[in-house]
Image (spheres, rainbow, N blue to C red):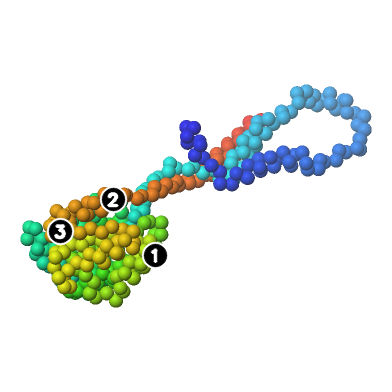
Amino acid sequence: MSDALARVAFAWPWAWLLLLLPLAGRFFMAKERSLKEFVRVPFLPALIESLQPDNQPARSGKMATGAFWVIWALLVCALARPEFLTTPQHIEKPMRNIMLILDVSGSMEKNDVAGGISRLQAVQASVKKFVAARKSDRIGLVIFANSAWPFAPVSEDKQALQTRIDQLSPGMAGQQTAIGDALGVTVKLFDQAGDNEASRLAILLTDGNDTASQLPPRLAAQLAASHHVQVHTIAFGDTKSSGDDKVDLPLLQEIARTTGGRSWTAENSGASLDAVWQEIDAITPVQVKSIGWSWRVPLFAWPLAAALLLLLAFTLARLFREKTA
């Protein structure tokens, strides 16, 4: 009961000053002037004796006075607008936004991963495990090949993201690789998300080097750093290949270093790729913010109704006494 009373507050507490208004009217308003004229009534003693008035003084009306003060106090209480604060409700708001930047160029179709699956199939399997493990983050997806495309907005809807990951296919955005453009699109999507309090993390996975970007990758890394976007990079594929198919390890390492991230190299196996994603998960602690709020339930109707009921009851009782007198 004490806890419930502690949750009662008044929106207009200054209204309680009106409780003294009747006293102010009683003591500070000008009193009626007493009459100084006297009338002589010679036959007054005989008149009093014939009328035989009741010697008991009239009742002072203590009940009416008490009823007035109770009703007035209830009306003032209603005017002060009592409110009940409900028990705070808490939710946890994600405070980390993650963008997955995945290479879907034609080279991701190569079936050189252990188990006879393509590179992209291995990436899809490991990325889905990572997404499932990050329950308290908002995650989006950017794909890139000849150019970069936002494929899933940053959100808490992990099921929709898993569906989008399943829809990836090699060469769906071209055959080349645009790493710099992918970073530029990622920075833009983070800015459009509007949550400036949340930290920003991008994870870039590619099996080649930059061959198609309009925005130079190193300049894109500087842009990401200036927008507080940390970038982890993953080199996946055959590091011994040559030409455009060779992973540009120095570039990926420089991107990670510029943005304060880390760089990994995964061998051509799903197990090694899973290990990289698990390590990223381990070094990326969950960031949430607990938000609580309470509703204010108005209570003024209760004292107002009580005042009206008392006034009605007092009026009816007075009418009943007058009729039975």
- Inspect the image, locate mark 3, and give the three-letter code of the amino acid beneath it: Glu
Left of 148 or right of it: where is 289?
right
- Inspect the image, locate mark 2, and give the three-letter code of the amino acid beneath it: Ile
Left of 81 or right of it: where is 99?
left
Q: Residue at x 78, y 25 (%)?
A: 53
Looking at the image, residue 263 lies above or below residue 11:
below
Please state which of residues 59 and 79 is positioned toward the viewer in this rendering: 79
Mark 3 residue crowding within 10 angstroms, few (<14) / some (14–19) / many (20+) = some
Report the Cα–Cα distance between label 1 and label 2.
Answer: 22 Å
Q: Earlier in the sequence, mark 1 or mark 2?
A: 1
C-beta proximity under 8 Å, tags 3 and 1? no
Q: Position of residue 265 (x, y in %)?
A: 20, 59
- Per the image, the residue denoted by label 1 is 226
Q: Quadrant of the C terminus?
A: top right
Q: Residue at x 7, y 58 (%)?
A: 115
- Per the image, the residue denoted by label 3 is 267
Looking at the image, residue 278 lies above or below residue 218:
above
Looking at the image, residue 297 lies above or below residue 172:
above
Q: Quick check: can you spot residue 83?
A: yes
Please state which of residues 47 and 60 is positioned toward the viewer in this rendering: 60
- Inspect the image, locate mark 1, and give the three-letter code of the amino acid beneath it: Ser
- Per the image, the residue denoted by label 2 is 283
